[in-house]
Image: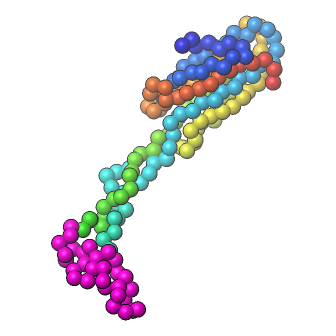
């Protein structure tokens, strides 16, 4: 895949890197970028077991399901799978919740003109799965415009983890 931009054409880009365009006429230019990346908040406590109990219920023994029919004052007590009838109860401190650590992108996108930044995208938030922006600037014949996608995050550096659609056009 070439790492250059063509005027008025979308460049679909997988991963990180630098894309370059050399201006051939003075005027106003704009760069549009849409990037998506993996990002989701953590769930549970991200350790073995979240402390969410499975619930043992009450009852058991010979009463089990029938205890609720002994008058209006008793009411149903549970499923009746108490430890007294030989049923192995799940631990009350067990977990029925899947826990995992969150993933947050630290993607940085900078648009440069002759090596100096003209636009820097805001850092993504923990639940933000994409960045989209358009920036305009004036440029002269021979100026070098670059769009730099970089990251220090391990998730962003995986193959095709960051997918982008980048274009440069004349005008505002």
Quadrant including the N terminus? top right
For the point 44% across and 51% down, the residue is 43
Start-end of magenta stretch: 59-88
Question: Where on the picture, by quarter, is residue 124?
Answer: top right
Q: Identify the residue at horizontal 33%, vertical 91% (top origin).
A: 70
The residue positioned 19% from the left and 77% from the top of the image is: 84
Q: Position of residue 39 (x, y in %)?
A: 51, 40
Left or right of 110: which side holds 17?
A: left
Q: Is residue 68 magenta?
A: yes
Q: Main secondary structure of the magenta part?
A: loop
Residue 65 at least partly seen: yes
- Relative depth, front residue between 164 and 140: 164
- The answer to whether 161 appears left or right of 71 in the picture is right
Position in image of residue 74 (x %, y %): 36, 89
Q: Is residue 145 covered in magenta?
A: no
Is 132 rendered above or below residue 80?
above
Residue found 31% across the figure and 85% down from its top: 67
Residue 152 image offset from top left, x and y in percent? 48, 29
Q: Is residue 114 visible?
A: no
Establish if 167 lies above or below 69: above
Residue 72, image x, y percentages: 40, 92
């Amino acid at each position: 895949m070439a790492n250059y931009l063509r005027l008025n054409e979308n460049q679909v880009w997988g991963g990180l890197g630098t894309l370059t365009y050399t201006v051939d006429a003075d005027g106003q230019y704009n760069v549009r970028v849409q990037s998506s990346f993996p990002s989701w908040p953590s769930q549970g406590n991200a350790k073995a077991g979240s402390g969410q109990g499975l619930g043992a219920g009450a009852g058991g023994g010979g009463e089990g399901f029938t205890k609720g029919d002994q008058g209006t004052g008793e009411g149903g007590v549970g499923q009746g799978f108490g430890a007294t009838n030989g049923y192995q109860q799940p631990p009350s401190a067990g977990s029925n919740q899947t826990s995992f650590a969150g993933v947050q992108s630290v993607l940085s996108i900078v648009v440069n003109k002759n090596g100096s930044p003209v636009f820097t995208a805001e850092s993504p938030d923990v639940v933000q799965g994409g960045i989209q922006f358009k920036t305009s600037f004036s440029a002269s014949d021979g100026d070098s415009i670059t769009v730099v996608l970089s990251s220090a995050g391990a998730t962003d550096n995986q193959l095709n983890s960051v997918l982008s659609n980048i274009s440069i056009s004349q005008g505002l």
